[in-house]
Structure formats: structure tokens, C-alpha cells
């Protein structure tokens, strides 16, 4: 081949490969910058760079929203659902990783000038006083889209056309590996713009030692030093003033929030610098300050020093909008103006943790099953011992409470009795009706029975087989107990606590975990249907007003099962793990995976009283 032909072939090959790379990057579009739908995966694209991908998403979906929430990653924990309710709006969360106020200003100006906006909420973070106009990386994370910066659109898009195609290959690999639960490559809920915290919201939270083991940063907080600077403060305040003026000009409701931070994080800063920033912020705009209060000292409200859980965002918004239906610590949230900023800062400097007993409660749970004449060392107990245990609880001043009482304590801050105890029965045996209910009434106790829906009323079935089933009470008997006010009936699933001798399948479903080889879609569909069916049969057949509590069959669960239960309205769950429980006001996750003490004939009255003793908490 002549050198001329070789050169032509080489150039053609280069052009072909270049065109192939450009076409591949355009088609896959891992950063969500090209407005086409070929391989759209907004949550993945937002994870790589929420600044670019959210603007592309809004080009198609902005008609669905009329209000926006702007700021750094902690902004995600102000739930848009609550803002929608309080302001009769449709919010989109524009959170960006490490957003400085120039980023926020550029976003706000674009939104206000291009879309219909009713409300604009900005989260101002103490780091905005030390960082402004931070340099972006070439492609991801911190790069602002051309729509907001005025950069040439062609030059902006060219960076993504000519990028390393491995970015696009990574998206295809992630697509193949994707699951229902969020993974590191798809951490956003595209429809709200917030982080997808479904898995984190399903974490069982209560015991402090266990929490510090899961989040060791709080056990040994790293030392660091931060300092504000005049350039960042001036840029931040000028940006806020610009946003404020634009909102006033366009008749947009403008709200500024200062998000909570963990107490040790504030120690990074010199207090005089902190006070200076918040004082000058009040000169620009009034704001709601949640940054430092008693909440800042409770690790179980936080993931790390600057990221707080959604329940804290719920409390903050409830304070802003005067919603007294949920628990809010008294010192959490102050509306700051030029007139009260100095008094606020004096109070803020004195913030201290609440006494733990003022916002937590130790609650033991007893787990019973069947009552018979003799009992055993497994799950059966004799009526004689059961009565002795109930008599002892009454004599020692214990008050039996329902799961709804625990929920009222957590969600609303309503007081529990001095010595609360939760009494539970699993499965729904006839003996609960014949023996337990009268004894409970006699001693002024209450209990919750977790029934298996498919076995309700099974008193004669399998009676003469090799595996006779222990009789279960009927709908009519359940309704009678519920009407007495002594018994609450809740879910042990409709039919996900199976026993091999009675099942046609060679793989009976003994608990709510997915079976081997079962697809996520099939599993979630089946568990969701079971949740709806057990709720329906208990409410319609027994008159229980609200069915939202579940005892896991065999005590087994995982993150996917708990997420699915939460999606189906089961927000209080019990396991068979041994131990007591710490409930935390304002922290709904402290109602998940509650521990129980298994009661049988081997548990003496003295042992039971030791287990339930408040001193154990």
C-alpha cells in the first residue's frame, strides 16, 4: 500500500473512531446534558452531577413544579412533601454537592427568568462563609450547566461529546447492576430532586452503642479548623441580596433556612466569626436558623457533621409553619431578623444537649405465643404462669401500652407512663381469646396480637392429620377483643409465615424475605399485596381502626423488606431479637426492628421483672 493510501486510511479510521466515540457519548449521555430520551436514567445522571442533570430534567418536567429548594447536599433533608403541604405548592429540590452561593445564585436566576416560580427556598450553610466561586472539575460534580453560567452551549456540550468513553461504559455497567434500592451510582430520587433515602430511612435506630458502631465518626470526632473569609462572606451575601431582589420583583415568596449541623462541627470555627456571619446575614434577609441547638448534640439525628436525617428536616419545617402536631424541641429554630439577631446569638452560644430522659424512653416488649396447660421452654406458657406474670406487672406499677402509644411518643412527644411495657402475642391462637384476654382484663393490662391472616378461624382444619394445627381465634372473636379496648390486632402477614407440612410448594415462604431466585419485582409485588390483604381482613373482619404494625415472621427481615413495608404504611415493626428498646422523640426510625423478650414456661416472674426493669435502660 502506498504511503498516500495508508495516510488516507489512517485518517479515515481516526475520523470513524472519533465519530463513534462522539455518537456513543451522545447516545449514552451519562451526565444528562443532551436532551434526548434514548438512555435516560435521571437518578444516575444526577448522581454524577446534579447541577447539569437537574437542569436537563427540568427542561422536560418543569411544568410539574412551581417552587424550588436550593442549596448544598444537606438541603435534601428538608422534605419537599412537607413544603408542598404547608405552602400548597409543587417543590423540586435542586440540591448540589458542596454548593457555594454563586452556584445557588446562578440556579435561582435561571429558574426565576425561565419558569413559573411561586416559592424559592434557599439553604444557607456555614461553609458558605468560607467558600465562594469554587473551581469546578471539567465534567462532573461541580460543573454548572451552560444555561446558568452564560457559557457557550456548543463549548459546554463539546466537553461531554469528546470525553473518555469509559464514563459512558460505566453507565451501561451500572444499568445492568441496578437494583430497586439505591446504590452508589443512583443516589437521587429524580421526581423530587432529593437524595433517595429509602434504605437509610429503613435503618433501625435506638441503641446508642449500636448507632456509634454503625456511624463511628460520632464516637471519635476528628479535629479540624475552619475559618470564614471576607471574599466568601461578601460574595454569599451579595448573591442572596440579588436573589431576594429578583423574588421581590417577580412576586415570589422567598425563604432562607440555615440547616442544622452537628455540635462538634461548629467547634471547628471561631465563635466570633460565626456570630459575624449570622449577624451580617440578618442585615440582608430574615432567616430561620436551625444551625445550633439541643438537636445538634444528638448523633441519632445525623449521618455526619453536616448531614441530618429527614426527621430533623420535618421538625424544622413544622417550626417554620407553626405545625404543633409533631414533636419539636423548644430551642430548635428561631426566626432571625436584625432586631433579634444579637439576642439569638447569645442564646445560640449557650446551646446544650437535653437531658436524655427528656426525649428518650426505654420500653421493654414481651413476646408470647400460645397458652396451654403445661407450657414448654420454647414458645408456650401455662395460664397459671401467665397470670402470675400479669399480676406481678400490675403490682410493680407497670402500664401496658399499645404500639400506637409508642408512635404518639415518637411523633408527637406525648408522654408515656412511668413504667411502660408492651405485651405482644404472635400468630393469633385461640388461647389468646380463651385465656390471655380475660387475664389481661383482670389486671388492667393491654396486649397486641399479631395474626397470620390465612389461619384466622382455623379451629378444626387439619385436626385429624399427622400435623394438627393449633386452633386460631375467629374474626368474630377478634372483633370482640378489639371492641373491649384491651386488645389491638396487627399483622404477622397474611400468608408469609408458612409451615412445610401444609404447603404444596417445596419452598414454603416461612418469612418475609425473598425466596432464592425470586426477582425483586415479583417479591415486592407479592409482599405489597400481602400487606394490603392483611390490613383489609383485620380492618373489615375485626374492626381494628388502623393496621400499620408488623411482627416479622420468625423475626427475619432485611433492608428491602423493611423498605417495602414502609412503602405500604407499616411504620412500626417488631423482631424476635432479645433486648429492650430506646425510643427517640422525633425519630420515627426508633420504631423499627423493636426487640422483644421471648416468654415461655422457663421464664420466672423474677426473670421477667428483671428484664422489664427501667434500670436496664
Image: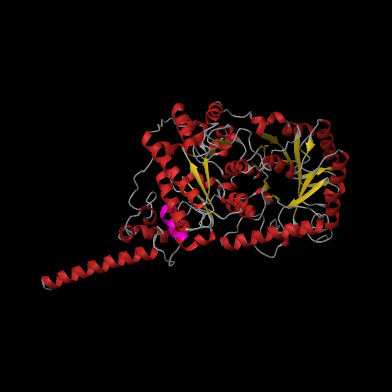
The magenta segment: 50-58
Q: Quadrant of residue 577?
A: top right
Toward the viewer: 105 or 612?
105
Toward the viewer: 159 or 1?
159
Q: Is residue 275 left or right of residue 568?
A: left
Q: Quadrant of the N terminus?
A: bottom left
Q: Is residue 142 magenta?
A: no
Q: Is residue 56 magenta?
A: yes
Q: Where does residue 483 sit, x and y in percent of width and height?
A: 85, 50
Toward the viewer: 329 or 200?
329
Q: Quadrant of residue 315?
A: top right
Q: 284 above or below 117?
A: above
Q: Where does residue 7 sit, x and y in percent of width and height?
A: 15, 69
- The reply to whether residue 130 is in sight is no
- Identify the residue shown where x is 69% and y is 65%: 504
Q: Where does residue 440 sit, x and y in percent of width and height?
A: 84, 42
Magenta: main secondary structure equals helix
Q: Quadrant of the C terminus?
A: top right
- Identify the residue shown where x is 42% and y is 31%: 224
Q: 461 above or below 311?
A: below
Q: 367 above or below 496?
A: above
- The reply to whether residue 369 is in sight is yes
Q: Is residue 255 left or right of residue 141?
A: right
- Identify the residue shown where x is 58% and y is 59%: 516
Q: Where does residue 141 sit, x and y in percent of width and height?
A: 39, 50
Amino acid at each position: 500500500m502506498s504511503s498516500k493510501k495508508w495516510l488516507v486510511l489512517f485518517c479515515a479510521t481516526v475520523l470513524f473512531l472519533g465519530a463513534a466515540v462522539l455518537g456513543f457519548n451522545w447516545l449514552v449521555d451519562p451526565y444528562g446534558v443532551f436532551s434526548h430520551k434514548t438512555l435516560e436514567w435521571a437518578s444516575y445522571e444526577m448522581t454524577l452531577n446534579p447541577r447539569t442533570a437537574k437542569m436537563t430534567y427540568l427542561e422536560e418536567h418543569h411544568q410539574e413544579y412551581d417552587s424550588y429548594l436550593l442549596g448544598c447536599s444537606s438541603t435534601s433533608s428538608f422534605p419537599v412533601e412537607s413544603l408542598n403541604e404547608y405552602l400548597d405548592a409543587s417543590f423540586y429540590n435542586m440540591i448540589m454537592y458542596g454548593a457555594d452561593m454563586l452556584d445557588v445564585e446562578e440556579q435561582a436566576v435561571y429558574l426565576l427568568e425561565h419558569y413559573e416560580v411561586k416559592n424559592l427556598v434557599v439553604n444557607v450553610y456555614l461553609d458558605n462563609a468560607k467558600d465562594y466561586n469554587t473551581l469546578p472539575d471539567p465534567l462532573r460534580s461541580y460543573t454548572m450547566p451552560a444555561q446558568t453560567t452564560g457559557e457557550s452551549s456548543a463549548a459546554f456540550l463539546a466537553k461531554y461529546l469528546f470525553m473518555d468513553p469509559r464514563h459512558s461504559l460505566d453507565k451501561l455497567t451500572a444499568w445492568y447492576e441496578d437494583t430497586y434500592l439505591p446504590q452508589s451510582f443512583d443516589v437521587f430520587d429524580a421526581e423530587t430532586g432529593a437524595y433517595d433515602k429509602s434504605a437509610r430511612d429503613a435503618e433501625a435506630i435506638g441503641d446508642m452503642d449500636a448507632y456509634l458502631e454503625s456511624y463511628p465518626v460520632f464516637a471519635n470526632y476528628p479535629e479540624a479548623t475552619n475559618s470564614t473569609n471576607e471574599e466568601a462572606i461578601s460574595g454569599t451575601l451579595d448573591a442572596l441580596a440579588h436573589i431576594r431582589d429578583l423574588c421581590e420583583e417577580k412576586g415570589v415568596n422567598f425563604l432562607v433556612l440555615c440547616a442544622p449541623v452537628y455540635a462538634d462541627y461548629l467547634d471547628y470555627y471561631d465563635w466570633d466569626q460565626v456570630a459575624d456571619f449570622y449577624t451580617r446575614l440578618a442585615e440582608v434577609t430574615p432567616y430561620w436558623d436551625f444551625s445550633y441547638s439541643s438537636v445538634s448534640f444528638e448523633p441519632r439525628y445525623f449521618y455526619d457533621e453536616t448531614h441530618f436525617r429527614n426527621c430533623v428536616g420535618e421538625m424544622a419545617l413544622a417550626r417554620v409553619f407553626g405545625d404543633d402536631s409533631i414533636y419539636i424541641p423548644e430551642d430548635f429554630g428561631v426566626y432571625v431578623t436584625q432586631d433579634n439577631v444579637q439576642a439569638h446569638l447569645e442564646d445560640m452560644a449557650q446551646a446544650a444537649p437535653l437531658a436524655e430522659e427528656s426525649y428518650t424512653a426505654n420500653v421493654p416488649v414481651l413476646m408470647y405465643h400460645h397458652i396451654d396447660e403445661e407450657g414448654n421452654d420454647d414458645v408456650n406458657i401455662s395460664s397459671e404462669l401467665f397470670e402470675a406474670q400479669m399480676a406481678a406487672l400490675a403490682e410493680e406499677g407497670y402500664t401496658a401500652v399499645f404500639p400506637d402509644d409508642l408512635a404518639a411518643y415518637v411523633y408527637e412527644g406525648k408522654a408515656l407512663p412511668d413504667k411502660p411495657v408492651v405485651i405482644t402475642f404472635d400468630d393469633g391462637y385461640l388461647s389468646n381469646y380463651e385465656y390471655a384476654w380475660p387475664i389481661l382484663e383482670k389486671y388492667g393490662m393491654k396486649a397486641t396480637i399479631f395474626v397470620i391472616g390465612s389461619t384466622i378461624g382455623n379451629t378444626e382444619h387439619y385436626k385429624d392429620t399427622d400435623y394438627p394445627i393449633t386452633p386460631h381465634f375467629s374474626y368474630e372473636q377478634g372483633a370482640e377483643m378489639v371492641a373491649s379496648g384491651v386488645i389491638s390486632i396487627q399483622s404477622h402477614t397474611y400468608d408469609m409465615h408458612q409451615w412445610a407440612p401444609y404447603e404444596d410448594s417445596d419452598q414454603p415462604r416461612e418469612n418475609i424475605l425473598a425466596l432464592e431466585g425470586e426477582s425483586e419485582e415479583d417479591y415486592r409485588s407479592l409482599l405489597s399485596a400481602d400487606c394490603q390483604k392483611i390490613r383489609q381482613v383485620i380492618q373489615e373482619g375485626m374492626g381494628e381502626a388502623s393496621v400499620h404494625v408488623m411482627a416479622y415472621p420468625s423475626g427475619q427481615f432485611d433492608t428491602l423488606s423493611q423498605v417495602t413495608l414502609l412503602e405500604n404504611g407499616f411504620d412500626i415493626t417488631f423482631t424476635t431479637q432479645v433486648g429492650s428498646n430506646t425510643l427517640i422523640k422525633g425519630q420515627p426510625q426508633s420504631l423499627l426492628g423493636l426487640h422483644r423478650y421471648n416468654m415461655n414456661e422457663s421464664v420466672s416472674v423474677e426473670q421477667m421483672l428483671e428484664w422489664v426493669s427501667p434500670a436496664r435502660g
